[in-house]
Image (cartoon, helix red, strand yellow):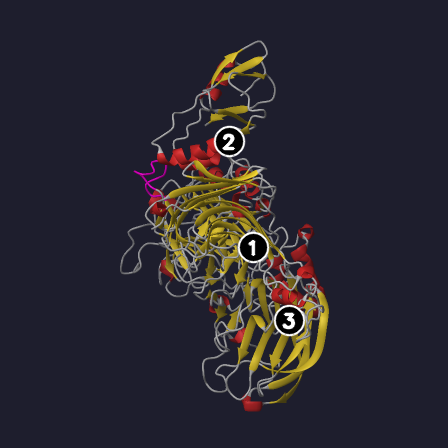
Amino acid sequence: MTNHPSRPWIPVLAVLAGLTSVQADYPSTVQSDQPLAYYQLDDDTSRDGVNRNAGSVGASGDATQDLGRVHSIPGAIVGDGNRAVFFDGTSRTQVPWNAAMNPARTEPFTVEAWFKPSSDQAVPGQAPLSNRYAYPGADRTGWVYFQRKPNADHAESEPVGWNFRMFRGSGSSAGMDITSGVPYELGKWTHVVVVYDPADALNATLRIYVDGQEANMAEWTGGADGETPGYASNTSGNDPSQAVFGDAALSLGSYNNTDGTSLNPYFGGIDEFAFYSARLTPEQILEHYQNATNVNRTVSYDALIRSRNPAVYLRLDEITDGPDVSVNLGEARSAGIATHQPEGVRRPAASPLAGDTTAGSVAYNFRNSRRTVTTVPFHELNNPEAGLPFAVELWIRPMSDRQGGQCPLNNRYVRGTGRTGWVIFQRNPNLSYPPSEGHGWNFRMFTGQGGSGQDVVTGVDYVVGEWQHLVFTWEPIAYVDSPGGNDQWEGTLSAYVNGELADQQIRLYAANRNPPEDFDEPSDLGIGAYNAASGLGDNPFEGDIAELVIYNDYVPSLEQIRAHYQAGVNADLGRNYPSLVLSTPFAGKLEETGGPVTQRQGPATYLRFNDTAQYPLANSGTLGKVADGSAVLTANTAPGPRPPAFPGFAGSNTGLALNGTDQWASFNHPSGLDFEGQITLQAWVRPEATQGERARILSHGPQTPSAFLSRFLDYTEDPFEDALVNTTEVFLAIEDGTYTVGSRTSTVDPSLAPAELPVIASHVAAFPVPSSDLGGDQWVHLAGSYDGTHWRLYRNGVEVASAASGTGALRVPRGDWAIGSSGNGWADHFAGGIDEVAIYNRALSPARILAHYQAATQAGTPEIRITIARDANGVVLTWPAGAVLQSAGSVTGPFVDVPGSPASPHSVAFGETTFYRARQ
């Protein structure tokens, strides 16, 4: 650090002495070179249903999930990448009674949490938090949170906002009680804090804060007689004849263990719960809120909370074991949860919503005889009678122009004398394609009579790889007939694309029913392919689906449809997209009637598809969470390189085990990883003896080319408009028995047709795989780079191949990154182990690549110390030969090599504060 000469010298010396660099392990060595992406693949894979306490009472403050399944969703802290929990109305997690969370009425305490409600239900009151002793006949003690109505436009008599109710140990009577009175939005995080501040046993103040600001205050002054306390805390050791399920636990998601089966469940998200045996100040509460909402925070949110010494602090970022599902935010609730079938969808994939880093999608494919599909069981709310209006809304991104009835969404029943329900088909992208069944998107309704359907077709162009917003609406006009008992109605069927009406027709429709005509299983909803009622997995779709909504007994207005589209594509509007969706029917009925409107008017189904992956993979590189990934049909549970052979790794180091067939890891297409020119790709691999012709270790792309590619080659036709015929890729792989690093293009030139294949141009360095590397029992360090003139390949720290090339890394628009397969995950799978994957947007030097290998294989590297001396103009820094001086503006970095690579000793003039360190 350099300081002005007037500052004391000793502190300068102390700071520099503390900034020695020790590369004694592999991960820190890699991170010192600042990769854009670094997947250590050591993410926690425990799934024990315990939410761990980071507060002062330790494990006694852990919460255990004891009802239903608690789901993981993106958390409340902006830019943090943390997870939160979603309670679906059947789930709960509890902290057993402990004294620190139940201080005497004369002691202050603070309760803090983030809530993200998904329902406006105010009656009966949803209880997101409960710390109340409430066995039948008991004198109630403790406290409970209630969610009241969102705003005054709701007809219920309950007040607006969040309610904190305390009990005073006298029957079921409440004592102190406070409601925020501040409106909240469904689908949006809100910060709620309650502070209990007693003066003595009879006099106390209760304050509630919303989003950092005091919302309301209540005082207790001994009750009506001046002698009655307003609060009694829970105690332990209660009479077991009454406390049949034990002392009162702190419950998240519903009432606690003392309330029997009437649990007032909460439907929504909770994050960052903290209980303090102290009174937080208004300034501290505001600081918490401001930190959480500031992506450029200088102190992490969890560090700030811990600095306040909470007794219990639940980050709630643990993942629960169970089937691969996505939560339904609609009124069907847990009965409408979507289950991803075991063929392996990719999620969360990229989102269409501009500026929403917590949104996501699900990616579907049809490769390798696998047909990925998601199903939702039959629910009457998703299948209103044909005499009721309904609407279907989604964002969709096709990744192939293949025809033949690709089906992104299917709610059809095909058995019996007549088909019922509806289906969506992908048609041609535009009119330059051969005439078939139209172009755009086809919504087909069935009449309950025979197998034919009645359509609307959008007739609007789409581009493979780009998102479109679709809405289809049904508005019944008149009853027609009842063929086979399937009530048939005439009505108006409309299609909207990107906020505008695209087609509208008068059609006939018969809805699915339960039981169906033949008394078989009723129709499920299929996403990504046909449903079980139509042939599960048939007519698979290749592409991404996001923000899927089904509205029951309501059709959004054109203004609402436009607002949804605009909110999705324009982050500057400041509209919270899920809030718009969840409130759409309510808002429409409010405008129609003038209000007030009753609760629970939300959509039947709302699948955001942004749920946490079953096995997420964190990026430790400089791009941070935007490049986080997920394992597909596998997990990072296999042993990676470990001591004693690799002392630079922890003894518990893990990696991915891949079967060469369908297991891989995805990290989508972060913009920061789509670059050209210099690059370094790096990984540890343990290849099995048998590999495919091409087994990708790390790959960006290639894209999926047009399904009509052969037509362009065979018939000398120009490619259809916007058809993807040229592809690019960057990769580290085993190809035909050689380690290979490089880039490749596949180009179609119709003027050269007829031709059997596209023109392939490979820019690679390759080296035959030693037989000793194969067999799955030996870890090998591989690195490949392009330095501006040559592709270079390194094995175990030593260069083994190079090739001159004017082409380095290539941009791969619409192409994803993957570990163990092609970028989209559906081909070229690797068999064996992969660990410690890193990507740099520059060529690492041979010395640095060797240093990485040595950091793994050597017991330790001597620490590098910087010594300092003062001269007339500043300080002189001295460090060992061979080391590289780095600098940063902050002690926490990021550190970069000092420009010009100065040799030791190096003079630094007094000026701005700068921190230095040295690296190997």
The answer to which of marks 1 and 2 sits earlier in the sequence is 1
Depicted 622 relative to depicted 235: above or below:
above
Give the overall secondary structure of the magenta segment: loop
Look at label 2 and name its amino acid: Thr
**Residue 773: within the magenta?**
no
**Mark 3 and mark 2: Cα distance apart in space:** 53 Å
In the rendered image, which quarter is residue 805 located in?
A: top right
Please tell me the numbered disc located at residue 427. Answer: 3
Q: Which residues are magenta?
A: 642-653
Q: Earlier in the sequence, mark 3 or mark 1?
A: 3
Residue tagged 1? 702
The disc, 3 or 2, on the residue closer to the chain's N-terminal end is 3
Q: SS for tag 2? A: loop
Front residue of 706/528: it is 706
User: What type is the residue that disc 3 sits on?
Assistant: Arg
Q: Position of residue 825 (x, y in %)?
A: 50, 57
Query: Mark 2 highlights which residue?
Result: 892
Provide residue 55's location: percent of width, then percent of height: 40, 42
What is the x, y in percent for residue 134? Answer: 38, 59
Residue 297 as seen in the image, left or right of residue 638: right
Q: Amino acid at mark 1?
A: Pro
Q: Does residue 845 sit above or below 228 in this rendering?
A: above
**SS of the residue under disc 3:** loop
Eye-nearest disc, 3 or 1: 1
